[in-house]
């Protein structure tokens, strides 16, 4: 078998070593356009986990790399001279030039043919090869030639960055943040060999423009950067190596192979340098491709299929983590408003792979600083727009878990930050809640949640989603709701809010567990006559586009429902303006194509939802808070924009909203959401820290560790749980026991269980932490 490897980077070289070792009869030729000792950039980074994989694959390569790297265990975060060290992070830095030379040496030892200073853009010269491996980098000429076949997509990210070096010695991987008159600039720095360190400087495009940087003027760049970071450089020079300002290209390919050509390294997929996985991604994929060829030596297509099948999920997970990490840096000016330890904690947990507990196991002294700052110093001035109606109630005790700190909205005090998310039960009859709802809500209240937000409760009979939806438009409905609320107030400190809504074009849908809609469909209303087109919705033609008379009627229905909610004793109201329901249909350009005063720009699209909110705010007692739930993304092309979301949240805040419940999606049936753990928190972060209003977040949040992480890094003030509370009514009680937090709100009838529960959860936590420590990659420090 003849294999032509195009591009002599780490991925191509490592693939050649592994494959030639296992299949010595293969002829492997590596073609590289540069000289053997050419290298662009300075150092590369590997984690203990990655080095452990190298050890298991090729001991000689591992030993060569390990003998030439700089190792560190700490990460340091510094902002304008204030610093914090976080221990327990095993990484090494290695010169990229040295790494290439070591891998070239191993290739020669195994019998791989290396060809330098080659023209690698002409694929025809490799026509005699059985396999052509395109590992020719981000700007791959081979991939570009067949970009339609590969389904290549390249998205340039917003920030500007430049890769430089320095002689400044560093004891740890360090993020140096510097505030300038034009915005924040960060230096990602690490030592990779004695006397040399990598310095990647990054800032927003606006900051870059205001400083007057030029893409290719290296002298000007070094002069300006050296002055800004003169304290950090401590007299050491910056060194350039074709160090031009760039925007990071996020590369993906729908297919990784075409005929006998297969993609490897940056040609296939890129991962932002902020998670240090670019070279790791290339070398891990080299392992995957080599394994696939070794397993299928006579069937190239089968090998390519195995390569794709075994590696794609991992690659996409790393790319997603890198994008989430990159998003934090793209918004570092927004994050910069946080107190120092919260800022540092946000930086450490930015990709969502690292959580509060991870860091606590690595370095409890750091997490203690974060928690103490949160409990002692968070106040109106540095978290929310303080106008004396909202204030945080905190404890100075370091032992107080973030999730169990109190929170105040107007005159409403919540015992903790955990919220029961609105979840349809579809068990009402004629809009009447019943004993099912009493047990459902009552058990979560005695289970310890700080706030219950009811399932969407219709303001009219035709505002229901299904025949099983609850309502609050009759006196009998008010009486039944009051029975539930009285039980909650009499037996727990839990507060309960009602989500008032109107189904709009989603009305008349079947109950989820039933096969068909069994009632008589009613006329649906929406911003525009656009059907939802989802299975279960019987409407085949468009809903009626609302007239001003319809708007008057629906507004009056919301006001009457608000008065009924107060009569029933609800502590709070949440207005439903999300997920494509009636009010939300006005907000999204995908569901609002009106040409009158209620369509077009976001200010017009806001008019009717804002009118409804304003009227119900007038009708609800001023001491009671109100929330608005919005969809901050439609997950569809040409949907609601980030600027729209900021305008919407700002308008509701100005009109008197006390908190915004930030959700996404479900506006259109053809959405393509990017679902993962804590996946909606960035949208909450956007609203909270731009509009400066408290937020509720939700979305695949599964445990108390994630809740603490979200609150501590300032992405939300309250965390709403859906399925975890469906599965476990005592989620909060179990979480308190896991944290060994003495929750004094436990009903007297249940306190006897503490003598069993707290030791049990302490034992479970100890076992889990022992397992995490055991699974931590072995240190590769010499």
Image (cartoon, rainbow, N blue to C red):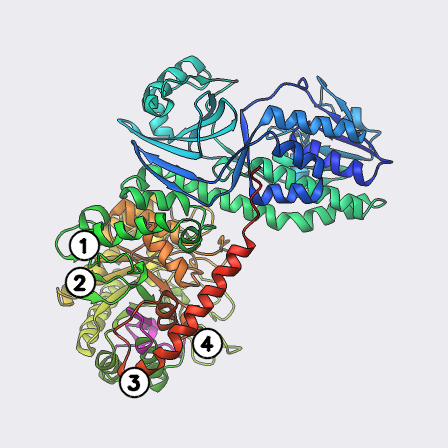
Q: Is residue 456 magenta?
A: yes
Q: Are marks 2 and 1 in contact (CB under 8 Å)?
A: yes
At 13% from the left and 67% from the top, the residue drawn is 621
Q: Are marks 3 and 1 in contact (CB under 8 Å)?
A: no
Rendered image: mark on residue 617: 2
Q: What residue would you read off at disc 1? A: 655
The first of marks 3 and 1 along the sequence is 1
Rendered-image quadrant of the C terminus:
top right
Spatial distance from mark 4 to mark 1, Cα to Cα? 35 Å
Q: Dot 3 lies on which element? A: helix
Can you tell which quarter of the image residue 726 is in? bottom left
The first of marks 4 and 2 along the sequence is 4
Rendered image: mark on residue 749: 3
Spatial distance from mark 2 to mark 1, Cα to Cα? 8 Å
- Left or right, 665 with respect to 489, comes to right
At 53% from the left and 24% from the top, the residue drawn is 42
At 42% from the left and 75% from the top, the residue drawn is 521
Q: What residue would you read off at disc 4? A: 511
- The residue range painted magenta reads 446-472
Q: Dot 1 lies on which element? A: loop
4 in relation to 297, above or below: above
Q: Dot 2 lies on which element? A: helix
- Left or right, 496 with respect to 351, comes to left
Q: Position of residue 645 (x, y in %)?
A: 33, 48
């Amino acid at each position: 078998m003849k294999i032509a490897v195009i591009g002599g980077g780490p991925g191509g070289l490592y693939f050649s070593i592994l494959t030639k070792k296992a299949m010595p009869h293969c002829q492997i030729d590596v073609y590289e356009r540069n000289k053997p000792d050419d290298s662009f950039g300075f150092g590369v980074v590997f984690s203990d986990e990655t080095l452990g994989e190298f050890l298991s694959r090729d001991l000689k390569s591992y030993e060569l790399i390990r003998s030439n790297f700089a190792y560190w265990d700490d990460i340091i975060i510094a902002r304008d001279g204030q610093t914090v060290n976080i221990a327990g992070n095993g990484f090494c830095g290695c010169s990229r030039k040295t790494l290439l030379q070591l891998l070239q040496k191993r290739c020669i030892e195994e019998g791989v043919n290396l060809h330098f200073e080659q023209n690698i853009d002409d694929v025809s010269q490799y026509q005699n090869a059985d396999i052509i491996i395109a590992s020719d980098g981000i700007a791959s000429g081979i991939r570009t030639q067949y970009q339609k076949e590969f389904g290549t997509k390249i998205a340039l990210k917003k920030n500007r960055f430049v890769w430089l070096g320095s002689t400044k010695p560093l004891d740890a991987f360090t993020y140096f943040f510097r505030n300038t008159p034009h915005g924040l600039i960060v230096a990602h720095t690490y030592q990779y060999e004695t006397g040399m360190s990598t310095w990647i400087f990054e800032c927003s495009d606006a900051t870059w423009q205001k400083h007057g940087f030029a893409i290719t003027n290296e002298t000007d760049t070094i002069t300006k950067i050296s002055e800004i970071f003169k304290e950090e450089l401590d007299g050491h020079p910056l060194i350039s190596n074709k160090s031009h300002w760039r925007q990071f290209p996020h590369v993906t390919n729908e297919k990784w192979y075409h005929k006998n050509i297969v993609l490897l390294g940056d040609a296939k997929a890129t991962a932002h340098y902020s998670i240090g996985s670019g070279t790791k991604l290339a070398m891990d994929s080299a392992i995957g491709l080599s394994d696939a060829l070794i397993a299928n030596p006579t069937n190239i297509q089968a090998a390519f299929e195995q390569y794709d099948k075994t590696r794609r999920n991992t690659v996409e997970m790393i790319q997603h983590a890198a994008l989430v990490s990159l998003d934090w840096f793209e918004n570092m000016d927004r994050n910069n408003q946080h107190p120092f330890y919260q800022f540092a904690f946000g930086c450490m947990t930015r990709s969502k792979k690292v959580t509060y507990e991870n860091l606590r196991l690595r370095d409890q002294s750091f997490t203690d600083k974060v928690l103490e700052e949160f409990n002692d110093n968070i106040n109106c001035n540095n978290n929310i727009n303080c106008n004396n109606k909202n204030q945080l109630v905190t404890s100075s005790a370091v032992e107080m878990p973030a999730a169990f700190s109190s929170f105040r909205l107007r005159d409403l005090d919540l015992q903790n930050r955990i919220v029961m998310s609105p979840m349809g039960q579809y068990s009402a009859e004629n809009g009447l809640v019943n004993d099912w709802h009493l047990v459902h809500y009552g058990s979560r209240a005695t289970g310890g949640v700080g706030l219950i937000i009811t399932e969407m409760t219709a303001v009219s009979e035709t505002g229901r989603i299904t025949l099983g939806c609850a309502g609050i438009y009759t006196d009998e409905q008010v009486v039944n709701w009051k029975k539930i609320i009285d039980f909650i107030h009499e037996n727990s400190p839990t507060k309960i809010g009602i989500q008032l809504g109107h189904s709009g074009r989603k009305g008349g849908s079947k109950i989820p567990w039933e096969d068909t809609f069994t009632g008589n469909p009613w006329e649906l209303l929406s911003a525009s006559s656009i059907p939802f087109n989802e299975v279960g919705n019987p409407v085949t033609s468009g809903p009626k586009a609302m007239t001003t008379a319809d708007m008057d009627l629906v507004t009056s229905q919301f006001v009457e429902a608000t008065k009924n909610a107060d009569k029933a004793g609800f502590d709070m109201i949440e207005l439903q303006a999300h997920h494509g329901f009636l009010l939300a249909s006005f907000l999204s350009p995908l569901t609002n194509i009106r040409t009158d005063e209620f369509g077009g720009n976001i200010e017009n699209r806001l008019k009717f939802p804002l009118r409804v909110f304003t009227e119900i705010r007038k009708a609800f007692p001023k001491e009671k808070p109100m929330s608005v739930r919005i969809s901050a993304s439609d997950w569809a092309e040409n949907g609601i924009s980030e600027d729209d979301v900021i305008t919407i949240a700002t308008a509701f805040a100005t009109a008197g909203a006390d908190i915004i419940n930030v959700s996404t999606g479900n506006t259109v049936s053809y959405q393509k959401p990017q679902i993962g753990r804590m996946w909606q928190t960035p949208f909450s972060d956007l609203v909270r820290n731009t509009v400066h209003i408290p937020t509720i977040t939700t979305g695949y949040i599964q445990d108390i560790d994630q809740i603490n992480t979200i609150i501590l890094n300032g992405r939300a003030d309250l965390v709403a749980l859906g399925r975890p509370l469906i599965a476990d009514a005592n989620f909060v009680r179990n979480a308190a026991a896991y944290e060994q937090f003495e929750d004094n709100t436990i009903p007297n009838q249940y306190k006897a269980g503490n003598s069993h529960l707290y030791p049990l959860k302490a034992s479970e936590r100890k076992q889990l932490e022992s397992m995490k420590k055991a699974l931590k990659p072995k240190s590769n420090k010499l």
